[in-house]
Amino acid sequence: MVVTMAVVIAWGLVSKRYSGPGRFWVNNSFAGVFYEIFWCLFFSFWLPKARPWVIALWVLGVTCGLEVSQLWHPAFLRPVRANFWGAALIGTTFVGSDFFYYVVGCGIGLLWSTLFKKSENDSSGKAK
């Protein structure tokens, strides 16, 4: 799973730096899919007993909360949002259509996490 997370991080970073056709959409909306997938896999790895659907719902809820928080621009968040990593982690501008990409990413993250858990259980001989 760690290798998969590294690949998802790479895809996410590439999507944030992509400069080809449709770059604005890829950089600012589609990249959210990879963000959601990563967090679903991350928490599935660190919380192996948690159910994947619970993790996906929490990730979706927190990310939607972060999206809504982008409507708020207090002075202490300006320096955080001014650099690449801060902007990538908490965002800078509210865009309602991003919720769609969050749902898609969490759906993929849920499926991926479920497949990892199933393959781990199958390989260790554990029952579901």
Image (cartoon, helix red, strand yellow):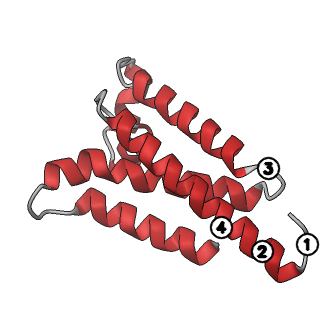
Q: Can residue 117 be seen in this snapshot?
A: yes
Residue at mark 4? 115
> Of all residues shown, which one is farthest toward the bottom?
123
Q: Residue at x 46, y 65 (%)?
A: 9
| Structural crowding at the residue carrying mark 2, measured as other residues with C-alpha within 10 Å and reported as few (<14), some (14–19) or many (≥20) | few
Q: Residue at x 28, y 57 (%)?
A: 16
The numbered dot on residue 11 is none
Task: Pick whichever of labels 2 and 3 is earlier in the sequence.
Answer: 3
The numbered dot on residue 50 is 3
Q: Amino acid at mark 4?
A: Leu
Residues at marks 4 and 1, CA–CA distance in whole angstroms: 14 Å
Say how many tags the image has: 4
Looking at the image, do the residues carrying marks 1 and 2 touch, with CB atoms under 8 Å apart?
yes
Of the 4 image quadrants, the one containing the C terminus is bottom right
Residues at marks 4 and 2, CA–CA distance in whole angstroms: 8 Å
Residue at mark 1? 126
- Name the secondary structure under disc 3: loop
Residue at mark 2? 120
Residues at marks 2 and 3, CA–CA distance in whole angstroms: 14 Å
Looking at the image, do the residues carrying marks 4 and 2 touch, with CB atoms under 8 Å apart?
no
Q: Measured from the top left, where is residue 30 in percent x and y?
A: 30, 51
- Name the secondary structure under disc 4: helix
| Structural crowding at the residue carrying mark 1, measured as other residues with C-alpha within 10 Å and reported as few (<14), some (14–19) or many (≥20) | few
Is 15 situated left or right of 90 in this image?
A: left
